[in-house]
Image (tube, rainbow, N blue to C red):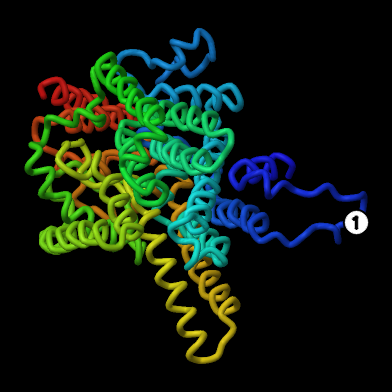
Amino acid sequence: MARAARLCEHVLGKEFQLPRLSKGNYSQLPMNRARIYSLLIPAATLLAYANSFSGPFSFDDLPWTELNPHIRHLWPLWNTLQPPQGVPGTGRPIVCFTLALNYAVSGLDPWSYHVANLVIHVSAALVMFGIVRRTLQGPRLRDRFGTQANGLAASVAVCWAVHPLQTESVTYIIQRTESMMGLFLLLTLYCLIRGHDSPRRLEWYATAVVCCALGMGSKESMVIAPIIVLLYDRIFLADSWTELWKKRSMLYAGLAATWLILISLVIVNNARGGGLLGSPAVSWWRYAKNQFGAIAHYLRLTFWPDTLCLDYGWQVSPLPRSWKAIGVVLVVGLAAATGWALANVPPVGFLGAWFFLTLAPTSSVVPIQDMVAERRMYLPLAAVVTLTVIAAWNGLSTLSRRFKLTPGMLRWAFFTLIAGALAWRTAQRNEDYHSEIAIWTDTTRQRPQNGRAWGNLGVSYFKARQFDSAFASLERAIELLPTYSSARVIAYTNLGDVRFAQGRYHDAITYLSEALRL
């Protein structure tokens, strides 16, 4: 409790320090709403993810953990930060260090890794609460939202934290790369806001640069952080670009310098295939065309998260053609609306810019191996949730006046219902992560043409010694995978392993020989 209080006080500011209570006299505790909300956010998030701690390592978790001997020690530090050649994690040293800390706590038992992921996510939600709250109480929006800032910010933070789209970044262990990057970006922005009117502004600005640097070492998508901070500053804090540069030029020089960290990591580690330099398997044009449909799909899942999927496959068209057409109209329309809002309603324009900027590193023209991945909505979701919550909040206020209802109770009931529904779907989704067989069965149900998913399902059955099911899944994978792909080679190798485990050695040799031929 004391640690939670200290974290909340850091995010909310010294003015919300918990009071000292005389022994046994709890009536002295003032009902400070900001403090109550700051405890509600972790409680709601924990409730949604209470069933997420028992899931095993799966898919990309395995090479980062079981196949990475460098996380098994904390010293020498350079080895911990730099995985061996051929092991994922190069270019993301901060994530590797957290995995080493987890290994020091629980070895290869996944529970501590899940706990760490949830701590990262809860921390990000608390920082989100601080950012939204202080923005609504800031000079641009104080007159309209100042008295309602606590409730609005808490509604945004809770809905964002318990949203089912976040499960891939929280329950899927290695996707802490996304949530850590998100946390450091939010902290960078939060430090700007705190430093703006603080007598200790240099300390806050220095902390912002440190957080930005840590984000650059967590995931390449952090590249947009200095731009987002600059845009926020101009819209919500500075009256002109001249004032901004005069007061905070050193801050932005420091933030820009963190790009050198990212560039050096990419160069030194030769940029992983899923990193900033992209994947040569797909042209930038074909990748970009598919992102219109992907963004439309993400937005649909934001409002109706019914068909969540771990792996959409690496094929060029993982989504129906209709989604691409809808996506073009939707994305172009939203981009135009964002441009108009930046010129006419800058606070709303900032939300649109946040959405597109945070998606840009992975969902624009830089080709990455996976066309679609729900984890990419970790930060963009914040913009959609914020705009939706504020619109609903204003709508409920109007409704309460028209029908002479108590606005506070109406809003409380509405957002409790929405957050409860989102948390229920999140808990339901977490059940899919309880075993490798469960998550890959769900994935093949969602994407029956995904050969990689069928191959992973086959491996999961093999680990469970369900050899007949493993063989059937691997055969299906071979039917779907490209003829000369490395995944097809792996599938044939796994078929050989299955037949060998069944004692059918002649068949095993046949499949292994085919793998060698390919």
- Locate residue 82, reporting x and y percent: 39, 15
**Residue 250 sits above or below residue 172 on the image:** above
Is residue 491 rendered to the left or right of residue 305?
Answer: left
User: Residue 484 sits in which quadrant?
Assistant: top left
| Residue at x-position 67% and y-position 44% | 14
Q: Height in image: 361 above or below 354?
A: above
Instruction: Please identify the quadrant where the N terminus is shown.
Output: top right
Outermost residue to the bottom: 403
* Position of residue 246 in the picture relative to residue 170 (left or right): left
Tell me if I can see residue 232 in this picture.
yes
Residue designated by label 1? 25
Query: What residue lies at 47% left-to-right and 79% top-to-bottom?
Result: 396
Give the position of the C terminus as an image quadrant: top left
Q: Is residue 78 above or below residue 240?
A: above
**Visible residue check, residue 507:** no
Which amino acid type corresponds to the residue marked 1 in the rendered image? Asn
10 Å crowding of disc 1: few (<14), some (14-19), many (20+): few
Task: Point out residue 272 in the picture as x, y percentages from the top left corner.
Answer: 25, 24
| Callout 1: SS | loop
Q: Position of residue 221 (x, y in %)?
A: 31, 36
- Please state which of residues 85 and 351 is positioned toward the viewer in this rendering: 351
